[in-house]
Amino acid sequence: MEFILILVLFFALMIIGAPIGTSLGVSAVATIIYFDLGAEMLGVNFASGIASFPLLAIPFFVLAGVILQRAGIAAHIASFFELLVGRATGGLSIVAVLTCMFWGAMSGSGPATTAAVGMILMAPMLRNGYDKAFAGATIANASDLSIIIPPSIAFIIYGNITSVSVSALFVAGIIPGILTGIGTIVVAWYISHKRGYRGLSKRGSFAELMTALRKSFWALLAPVVILGGIYTGVFTPTEAAVVAVFYSLFVAVVIYRSISWRDLMEILVDSAVTSSVIMFIVAFAGIFTWAASVTGVIDTLADFIIKVSPNAVVMIILVNLLLFGLGMLLDAISISYLVMPILIPVLSAFNIDPVFYGVIFISALAIGQATPPVGVNLFTAANLAGCEVDEIAKEAIPYVAMDFIVLIILSCLPILSLYLPVWAGLYSP
């Protein structure tokens, strides 16, 4: 009975439009209180759910991303790539993908990357004859890379749930992120070639390229500083997040001088709002997970998944399809807390490496950020492009198909995810 109540309440609240955090919290608390499963543990679980050292990285990375966004640093990165590849067929779409890759390595958030890059490149793409829905779909799908390429808030959440090294997860995401980015570039180039979307008429001179590189140098250096520090063991991912804040402040205030100290209050407020939304979901998702465990939901669903197929690859592909469906309805953080507690015993039963699966899991969730009806990147891009979400979703189909192809390749070749963390000495399978 407890099993039925918690699921019915959760889905009923979702159907009537309650926020995901509220749906998780109310269904869990109501079930615990009604069946007297230990209401005195609610406060303990609420506090322990967010009182985690790795989770401290989330508000710091959010703050660093907001600082860099307000500083207008994305424009410097885009200008460099325009001079580098802008003259190629579909040059601006390729520039959008490359800019999203580098910006995602600083923000760790898909919607933030969509907004930052969209405000810079949407207008130039439209001026050069690109269809607005295609331009929006390109930026929205390229922004998916933000949660695959480190640093990634999604990897921090996954590491916190599974007790897997976040440092290893960050490094494991580099090759898959690059491969996904290459796949996105291929699709952008092919569609641009078929539709006749030309590149920029003027190729940047060597002097202009060096000037653009100099202006964007400090922005391009940010991922190197963050990941280099983690890789060399100078600091942990949480400490890296703090370093990212001070680095972004230094770049924005001292190097580019694009924000003043008076802007900091507004930046802090925006960061606090974003972080509070994330932590609200994390706190109540933790209670929901505990309640689901007590009521037997997790064990029942885990046993069902194990019995579906004895083949690990088949299981991974089936779960990827499940994640794709959930990604159409929920955000990545909520899915992580709903699904991963169920999958932990499944991974153990199939002897699947948790770091390898972490990359697969997050890559699958990334696709959901650009799929309707609740793909957050699509809504952000549609607002910037001035068109309907359905139009962008239609243009996004080739990108989603390519993402699936890359996801299957990653699922079949664990070495693509594990090579770098093992080589760097951050992980031993």
Image: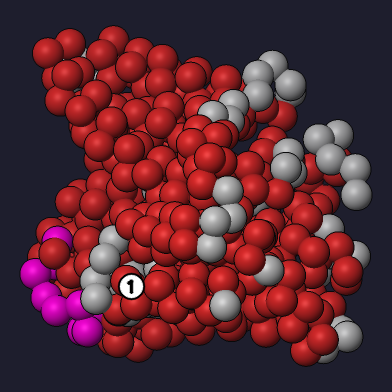
Answer whether residue 187 is visible to the viewer in this image.
no
Closer to us: 246 or 299: 299
Is residue 417 toward the left or the right of residue 216 in the image? right
Total marks in image = 1
Closer to us: 294 or 173: 294
Residues in magenta, as a range: 384-392
Determine which quarter of the picture holds residue 398. bottom left
Is residue 45 toward the left or the right of residue 299 in the image? left
Q: Secondary structure at mark 1?
A: helix
Q: Residue at x 33, y 50 (%)?
A: 113
Q: Residue at x 24, y 52 (%)?
A: 115
Q: Residue at x 80, y 64 (%)?
A: 345
Q: Quadrant of the N terminus?
A: bottom right
Determine which quarter of the picture holds residue 413. bottom right
Q: Amino acid at mark 1?
A: Met
Answer whether residue 347 is visible to the viewer in this image.
yes
Position of residue 403 relative to residue 169, above or below, is: below
Q: Which residue is mark 1?
A: 14
Magenta span dominant secondary structure: helix
Position of residue 234 relative to residue 172, above or below, is: above
Position of residue 117 relative to residue 292, above or below, is: above
Determine which quarter of the picture holds residue 356. bottom right
* Residue 222 at x, y percent in the picture: 47, 28
* Residue 291 at x, y percent in the picture: 57, 58
Closer to us: 265 or 423: 265
* Residue 237 at x, y percent in the picture: 61, 29
Q: Is residue 386 magenta?
A: yes
Closer to us: 364 or 255: 364
Q: Is residue 216 magenta?
A: no
Is residue 247 toward the left or the right of residue 239 in the image? left
Q: Residue at x 53, y 40 (%)?
A: 40
Crowding at mark 1 (Cα within 10 Å: few <14, some 14-19, many 20+):
some
